[in-house]
Image: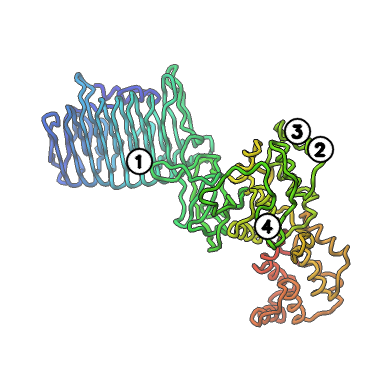
Amino acid sequence: MKKHLMRRIPAALLGLVTAVSMMPPGVVYATDSNRTVVAEANATNGDVTVTADNVTPTVRYNGDAIGVLASAQDGKTATATVRDINVNIASADFQFGVRAYSGDDWDTYTAGTVVVNCGNVTCAEQGISASAEYDGSSTTIHASGDVQATLCGVDAGTSAASEAKVIVDGNVTVTVGANGERTGVSVNASRGGNSSVEVDGNVTTVDGAGVQFRGRYDGNDVLVTGTVSGSKGILTDIAYYDTPGTNKLTVWKVTATTGSADDLFVKRVAFRDYQVDDITAANTNYIVHHTADLAPLAANGAALATSHGYSVAKEGEVIRITATGGKTVVKAYNAGTEITTKDAAGFWCLTVPRGGGISLTADISDAPAPDPDPDPNPDPDPDPAPDPDPDPNPNPDPDPTPDPDPAPEPEGVSGFVTRLYHVFLDRTPEPDEVEGWTTQIVNGTISAGQAAAGFIFSPEFINRNMCNAHFLDYLYLGLFNRAADDAGKDGWTFYLDEGWSREMVVQGFLMSPEFFNLCEAYAVNPGTGLANVPALGTIQTDHCTIAGCPNDAPVKIMVVSLYDTVFGRVPSQDEVDFWVNHMAAHTPGVTARVMVNTFLNGAEYSNLNRNNAEYVTDLYHAIFNREPDAGGFNGWLNDLDTGIKTREEVLNGFTGSPEFIDQCHHAGIEIGGEIEAQ
């Protein structure tokens, strides 16, 4: 009688009813492939073990059709091991593929242990039902195949300090068929219980919830390594008395068949005055799938959180995509779509979307990866606190490095500001200059990191036109209070040459422990770095002003070379300044490809009347800065002579080549898109 009552209670109240089978306690029941009863034993009289072949019942048990029924109490254990289960008896009151419960909710409560192992489970109504009904009871069902049903695929519930666990090694699929609310996976833990379901595959529900959390209290734990899909992705019916529970969901992806984001996570009204403990995107652990050559990290460079042994992240969190073995991620992809965002330290990064679905792959280079802490080989026993009165050049070197040798600086905020003037601007500040910066830092208007960036990207420092090598020397001294180590400097130089903006590199320094230690010594707040980190930022525009440095600005070299190789003349200063200033300002529409096209398709070049062979040679000289190689030259010339390509198309081929792109990256200028034929 009680079982029929439970079926008629509204779904929102189901969790408040003890989820126990109405079968007599202490029974293991199964039928073999010949549809005969092979075992029926009472586990109250002793442990029971039943082994059967494929189970396809044609008989009913107390009105229900059950493939495997197992229960135990009084400290006994019932174990059933079968292969595939198929239940489809339309005349039955209700149908279960597997029904297992430990403990008893009748007149006397006693604990027991039930273990069921099976293969595929197919049932016209409920695939698997596991419950534990008394303190210390345990029910475990392990299906090594798929579960298919038409009402509920998997249900696990407790009503005591007990454990009900279901493990499915395949997919759970609930299709249209039986009347009622369809659910792929349903969990209900109450009174200190722990109900858990692990599905190593997908959970798919036609017209129903993919996963439902129901009942009261806490202790529900669901893992789905694949996709959860339903007209409602995740449905919450959990009511609790006083405080939220510790319910947990770990999943790779959640989708709603309605196509509405509102149906990914749905909360239903709780029973009576109880509250609802939401399972939302915000507290869902999304599994981060990735290839073996990747090692995704959290935004701060720490390891990702884990759940059930999987790396996970929550909605809105940023994942930094790094490669194993210190290699470099050249391009990164999520589910085949290229990722186009880099973080402040220059790593490709992905913000976890609502619904998850993260599957990372990448193009990997053997080049060394950037280190978010540009000191990859620190002293094993460093003294992290810098001297409040540091020598700005503790390790002088014949190679010119910043050596302002200032007077000792005061301690505290004013000392920090004074140090910035000495190191980056190579001068002693006026009192009102120090006071202005100090006031802003003390008032919290800016952080120490923002103040340092203000000096580094000030016109006074930018106009020193330092090459990348000397720019890094000043960053190490000014922000770390030490000379650059070779490995760290080489790594940052590599990435500057690969197209990182100087702002990206500065952000990496400002977020490093070494800068934080410097700030601690001066009792200033390091902050969180730059408010804006552009992909194209400040660049060198003229010859490096450090004494004895031979390095001219790469962008200036490009411009002068174009005038020399294309027009055969020395440009005026105004001509050089025009292009260099536009490239440095990243003027919209003025890209490297536009600049080259202007030279090679302009009137001055047209008046030279160059033939195809001369034109291709000019492209090699102007764009690659080298003599043509025979194979490349003959190929391009053939394309022009046979009409396969126009000169504009050949020019786009040159400016779209890795050789030219590398030059643009080294100069820190925008490459731009192809030039359309006029």
Q: Is label 3 or label 1 in front?
A: 3
Image location (x, y in percent) of residue 61: 18, 32
Query: Residues at badges 2 and 1 in contact (C-beta under 8 Å)?
Result: no
Front-most of 95 and 338?
A: 338
Q: Which residue is mark 1?
A: 198
Image location (x, y in percent) of residue 396: 68, 57
Amino acid type shown at disc 4: Pro
Q: Which residue is mark 3?
A: 439
Q: Residue furthest top?
A: 273
Q: Secondary structure at mark 3?
A: helix
Rendered-image quadrant of the C terminus: bottom right
Amino acid type shown at disc 1: Glu
Q: Residue at x 67, y 82 (%)?
A: 634
Query: Residues at badges 3 and 4 in contact (C-beta under 8 Å)?
Result: no
Q: Which residue is mark 2?
A: 431
Nearer-N-terminus badge (2/1): 1
Q: Secondary structure at mark 2?
A: helix
Inspect this view and state whether residue 231 appears.
Answer: no
Q: Is label 1 or label 4 in front?
A: 4
- Inter-mark Cα distance, 2 to 4: 29 Å
Nearer-N-terminus badge (1/4): 1
User: Is 192 left or right of 331, judged from the image as shown?
Assistant: left
Rendered-image quadrant of the N terminus: top left
Q: Is label 3 or label 2 in front?
A: 2
